[in-house]
Image (cartoon, grey):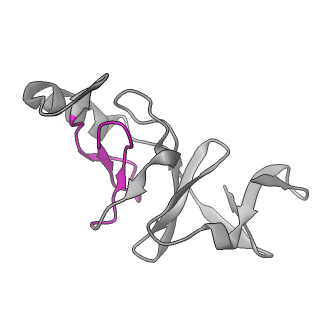
Amino acid sequence: MSQDPSTSTPSMPESDLVEGRVRRLGDWAVGRSRGADFAVSRRCRHQLADLSEGSVDAEGCLVCPWHQSRYDVRTGAMVAGPRGFLGYHGPTPGYTQLVLTYGRWLRLRVGRVVRAAGRVRVE
């Protein structure tokens, strides 16, 4: 990642934006899902994991690397709650529903990915 000299905005090479992969770009988790670029804020609504270390699943959702909360990258809404809490990884039925409920209202910020001169930045 480097600064785009014309805007002082973090940018990265277009070649880093690969289908199904997520990258960190400043305050954003950036990637490609189902052929479309996306940028969402980096912090999971569950326990603030860095979503740029997550993955994109077969349904095109961004998956948190800690407890597998899933996000719609177009809206920033949580579509599936966490599978664990702190260091525990497993079922948490009531807790998962609670987090899912507020995760639908407390959405991730959604940015717009801009490609120009072989570079990618978020607006």
Q: Is residue 95 magenta?
A: no
Q: Quadrant of residue 107?
A: top left
Residue furthest left as drawn = 93
The residue depicted at 33 percent of the width and 47 percent of the height is 77
Q: In the displayed structure, would residue 56 be above or below residue 44? A: below
Q: Quadrant of residue 16?
A: bottom right
The residue depicted at 14 percent of the width and 32 percent of the height is 97
Q: How many numbered discs, if any?
A: 0
Residue furthest top as drawn = 86
In front of the other: 4 or 13: 13
Q: Is residue 70 magenta?
A: yes
| Left or right for 70, reference 116 | left
Q: Main secondary structure of the magenta part?
A: loop
In front of the other: 25 or 113: 25
The residue depicted at 66 percent of the width and 73 percent of the height is 15
Which residues fall within the magenta stretch? 59-83
User: Where residue 119 sits in the image (x, y, percent)?
Assistant: 75, 68
In front of the other: 59 or 53: 53
User: Where residue 62 sits in the image (x, y, percent)?
Assistant: 38, 54
Q: Quadrant of the C terminus?
A: bottom right
Q: In the displayed structure, would residue 15 be above or below residue 4? A: below
| Left or right for 47, reference 38 | left
| Left or right for 50, reference 7 | left
